[in-house]
Image: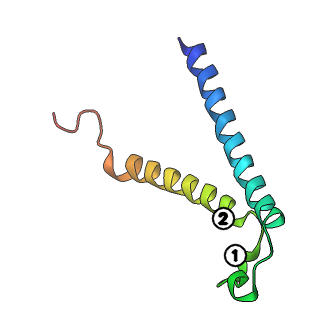
Amino acid sequence: MKMETKKRQKQLFGILYACLAASVVAELLVPLLSPPLSHEQAHAAFVWQEIPGFSAIYGFVGCILIIVVSKALGHRWLQKEVNYYD
């Protein structure tokens, strides 16, 4: 049973990495393949919005940080010891 779980986990991580790569590639290709925009439409509000692939990488890092911080919060503050209610 344990080997099946590890195999399934590797498959899921492979799917995760493939989706991340596809997202970054799509964000890089869409501006190249789409017709040019006028100056008013192409203006970015912030400098980092003009970096290709930034949104995908920022979203991925943000999700990882949410998971890590919430797990740390749960282990350090919310989780009680086994004999807490005895």
Residue at the (76%, 79%) spot, across then down: 37
Check the image and report above or below for 38 versus 11: below
Outermost residue on the front side: it is 35
Residue 35 bears which disc, if any?
A: none
Residue 40 sits in quarter? bottom right
Q: Earlier in the sequence, mark 2 or mark 1?
A: 1
- Disc 2 is placed on an element classified as helix
Horizontal and vertical percent position of residue 41: 68, 83
Horizontal and vertical percent position of residue 15: 66, 35
Residue 27 sits in quarter? bottom right
Query: CB atoms at circles 2 and 1 under 8 Å apart?
Result: yes
Location of mark 1 (residue): 49
The answer for how far apart the CA atoms under marks 2 and 1 are is 8 Å
Location of mark 2 (residue): 55
Horizontal and vertical percent position of residue 9: 60, 27
Horizontal and vertical percent position of residue 29: 80, 59
